[in-house]
Image (cartoon, rainbow, N blue to C red):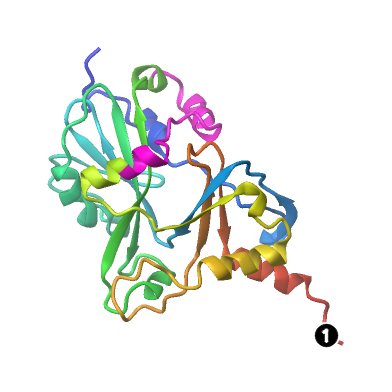
Amino acid sequence: MTFDVRTADLDALNSATKYPSIQTYHQLGERGSLTDAFTEFRGPVIGTEKVDGSNSRVICLPDGSWLLGSREELLCAKGDLIGNPAQGIVAALREFADALPPVAEAIRVYYLELYGGKITAASKQYTGTRTVGYRLFDMVELRDFQSVLAMPVAAISAWREAGGQPFAPEPELAAAADRSGLELTPRLFTVDGSELPGEIGAMREFLAEHMPMTRCGLDEGGGGHPEGIVLRTPDRSVIAKARFEDYDRTLRRRQPAAR
C-alpha cells in the first residue's frame, strides 16, 4: 500500500511518533520528591547531557514529505506556506527538514532538543544573545508503520509508552547524526551500571561531578548551569533521567527543620 500524507490518519501518525515518557532515575513520589527506589542498570551505561529546551520532531515520510512537530502536536508539513509558530520549532527546523534525503519504505523520526532563544526559562543558561540551537538525542525508524497506523489511537499510545518504538541504538544514532550534519547531545561518560549511586545524596554528588557546567553553550553569555543527565544503555533498552532540580528539592525537604 502506497503511503500518502494527504490521506493518512494524522492523529495516528502523531501518536506513533511522539516521544515517550522517560522515568526518573530515582522514582518520583509525592509532591515531586524522589523516593529511594531507583532504576537498575546492568552493563555499560552512557551518560548524556539533558538539555532544557523544547522536545521537537522531524518526521520523514515514505512519500518524500515531512512533518514538524512539538512533543504533543504536529505543527507543519512540507510545502505549507504557514506553520504553527509554537516554540519557534518550524522557524528553526524547516530548513533542516528540507535538506534531508527522502526515506523509502519507512517513517524516520529525528528527536531534537531545541533550546536557547526564549524557548524556556532556562534558555539564559545557554545563551546571552538569544541564540537558538538544536541537538539530536534519539531517532526512530518505523518500518512496520502500516500495521502501527492501523491501530486505534489509544492502542498506539499504549504501544508507544510500553516501549514499542524501535529506537536506534547508540552506534546507529551516532552514524545518523553524522550523515545529517547534526550534533548529538553531549556524551559525558560510559560507566558500568554497578557504578551508579543508589542513594539520593550520592547521586546528587555524581551529577555535580560529571556535569558541573553545560556543554551546550551557544555563546559566552550563557549562565552555564545544566539541567541534568540522561542515563541509557547502548541499545536504549533502559533509559532514565536525573535532574539537579529533583535532587535539590528532595534533599532540601529531607533536611531536619531548624529549631
Q: Give the position of the C terminus as an image quadrant.
A: bottom right
Residue at 32 percent across and 38 percent down: it is 109
Q: Is residue 158 magenta?
A: yes
Give left or right: position of 205 versus 86.
right
Q: Is residue 159 magenta?
A: yes
Instruction: From the viewer's side, name the closer residue of 61 and 26.
Output: 26
Determine which quarter of the picture holds residue 251: bottom right
Determine which quarter of the picture holds residue 114: bottom left
Question: Where residue 209 sits in the image (x, y, percent)?
Answer: 56, 69
Q: Which range is magenta?
A: 150-174
Determine which quarter of the picture holds residue 197: bottom right
Q: Residue furthest right?
A: 259
For label 1, count other residues whose C-alpha is less than 10 Å away and answer few (under 14), some (14-19) or many (20+).
Answer: few
Vertical side of 164 occupied by 181: above or below:
below
- Dot 1 corresponds to which residue? 258
**Residue 91 visible, this orientation:** yes
Residue at 23 percent across and 52 percent down: it is 93
Question: Where residue 25 sits in the image (x, y, percent)?
Answer: 63, 52
Give left or right: position of 159 versus 79.
right
Give the SS element for disc 1.
Answer: loop
Question: Where residue 18 sits in the image (x, y, percent)?
Answer: 41, 39
What amino acid is found at the position of numbered circle 1 in the picture?
Ala
